[in-house]
Amino acid sequence: MKPEAKYYLTQLGGKEVSFETGRIARLAGGSVIMRQGDTMMFAAATMGNIREGTDFFPLTVDYEERMYAGGKIPGSFFRREGRPSTDATLVARITDRPLRPLFPDGMRNEVQVVLMSLSADDENPLDMLAINAASAALMISDIPFDGPVGAVRVGFVDGELVVNPTLEQMAISTLDLRVAGTKDAITMVEAGANEVTEVLMAEALQLAHQAIQPIIETQLQMAAEIGKSKRDVKVIVKDSGLTVQAKEAVGSRLEALLDQEYSKENLYGGIDEIKNAYLLEAAGEEPTAEALAAYTAAFDDAEKAIIRDRILNQGKRPDNRKVYEVREISSEIDISPCAHGSGLFTRGETQVLTLATLGTPKEAQELDNLNGMESKRYMHHYNFPPYSTGETKRIGGQSRREIGHGALAERALVPVLPDEVTFPYTLRLVSEVMASNGSSSMASVCGSTLALMDAGVPITNPVSGVAMGLIKEGDKYAILTDILGTEDHLGDMDFKVAGTRNGITALQMDIKIAGITPQIMAEALDRAKSARLYILDQMLQTIAEPRPSLKSHVPRIESIKVPIDKIGAIIGPGGKNIRALQEETNTKIDISDDGTVFIASTSGVGFEEARDRILALTETAEIGKIYTGKAVRIADFGAFIEILPGVDGMVHISQLASDRVEKVEDVVNLGDELTVMVIDISPEGKIRLSRKALLEGWTAEEAREHDNPRKSGGGDRRSGGGDRRGGDRRSGGSDRRGGDRRSSGGDRGGDRRPPRRD
């Protein structure tokens, strides 16, 4: 029996989208396919049991980027999808973030959301469909979920905000804003922008929240009509009485600790001492695991309540700053003498060292994904080692967090990079977090700006970044500038903003509550602008603008243009020519399909030699130009001279010398060098050469007028009607052209009539 499918149509930015459910993956807790145009995203949500010993909510969101969706075969050795790409990881992260705060507090059941691309057209992006599909699958499932969530992208094209733009529109948009939210509030923001203003960003956020309302209404309709009954799950309910007791027991000690001079080590160490003493007093020396967990949770809640209350009602932050104050800043450049550029940025106890490397176009990253990009020339990698927080952990591959922070810093700096035409370099920046106490991602933005300017990269504007926080209880809230790790952990929002003096280049918001209003976001944006500009002023005291030139050990890349049909001559059979060129000139050479040749060298001499040899390999013969070449073939009627690599022309016997030549070998032998002028090039590309023109001081046109050989056999017409080499009729005093005047002191070139064309 064919499964019955249910379809729901709705609008997103004035375009029709649909949800389908009931046809496939019927054993999942909930599954849907969301479609826009020919782009389709599948989502399945399933809940398991409680994992023993779990003290957190184990939600997993995975995005499986299937290349068949775009009609592609994966490019790996195994020709199948393997480790998720960076783009796939970012889609999973951007989906997880708005969903996670909407599950019941204290829930410990495993929940897995699996997303999979089924079809990808050239018009509609997949990422926003992923969030909407995941939310819809949860809404109709048996999983407790306080949604729905709607998501949309907003661009800025030709001076207008565009909701749900196409890929073609996004290619020219100066804003890429992705927003997710509930009916009443915004829950997630991710943006890259070309220096847009705070006013425009706030307007775009408001527009996005309005645009997701139809999606939200449709999901509510789906849940009401076809949604499964929600399963009863065990929720860990905290004992509020224990929290009150803990607050009374440790309140004064925590207050005294918070009033002391701040350092992360002192605060965290002091809290651990107070916590251990409390657990010993309250739970005894040999508590049960259940009792220890309950008292630990009570202390943690008491600590959170005390710190939040001090901020919200007294304006006292853990390090005693005002809510709008930025921590002390210092910066340095040129830390690594061999790196192409380096910048060390320190803000409070957060410290990031960023190092820049400049490479050739060939070193750009090749991409194998469904977003339409084939490569990218700017890469930003972010590393967060355990020593940066004073911990010991296993060091492995990049975590999702590291990938996400690297992508955020990358977006922040892309708008200010010089274009590839004027600055044909591939750039890789690596941010090493040396110490972390809040907002290391924004410190990596600042360190990257310093490293780029230290390298001499002509960025259009320096970029700085800051992380904003939020403490909110009911209608009362406090926005915090430049948050500490403690404020991030205990607060309700981590709102990162990066940009130049002219505007915002990147934005990211993570929240732990159900959402915040556009009004709060607008206020946070305005506060962040003041902080960004203050941080930027501090950075520019170290280096005010990019170095006027690249450092001496940075490879200079210059380009020349060659005819497309000459690319093969540069590469040579099996790459022989280009390998030899690079080895012998100590350069790196990249060739674009349009004939642009990039030559990278740390030595001007190496560049010049490589350039000259490439030009020689690709030069095209020109009429009137003089060449010295080797004789590569000798014939009765003339010699073939290689005037350029792989290019030869014929100098007829009549053009070898001023006097009559009886035999070609009297003037030139195989392998001899001969200096000649190009006097003619036929439509078929055959090149006519003359040595006589140089001896007589003729132009190419004059040489052609004196050139009289028979085309059919290459014979010498000087003899009139004799054999093709020419029987000499000068003994009769004249040939058919009027006699060889060289013997009587007349015109050495004979008459100047144009040669016959028989």
Image (cartoon, rainbow, N blue to C red):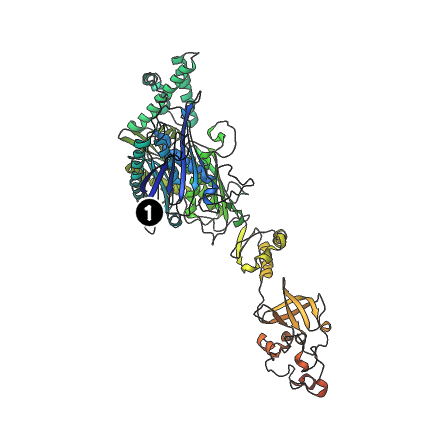
Q: Nearer the viewer, residue 363 or 166?
A: 166
Residue carrying label 1: 162
Residue 582 vs 87, above or below: the answer is below
Instruction: State which quadrant residue 240 falls in.
Output: top left
Kind of residue at disc 1: Val
Residue 413 in which image quadrant: top left
Q: Nearer the viewer, residue 271 or 637?
A: 637
The N terminus sits in image quarter: top left
Question: Horizontal placement of 313 versus 28: left or right?
Answer: left
What x and y, as percent, mark residue 466?
38, 38
Classify 651 as above or below 135.
below
Question: Few, some or many C-alpha atoms within 10 Å of disc 1 (few <14, some 14-19, many ≥20)?
Answer: many
Q: Residue furthest left?
A: 475
- The image quarter containing residue 272 is top left
Q: Residue furthest bottom?
A: 733
**Total marks in image:** 1
Looking at the picture, tell me which residue is in the foreground, 428 or 734: 734
Q: Position of residue 492 (x, y in %)?
A: 34, 30
Q: Who's the residue at 43% across and 15% down the image?
A: 289
Dot 1 falls on a residue whose secondary structure is strand
Is residue 750 visible in the rendered image? The answer is yes
Name which residue lies at 45% across and 48% down: 546
- Which residue is painted at 28% across and 38% down in the image? 519
Q: Is residue 471 left or right of residue 718?
A: left
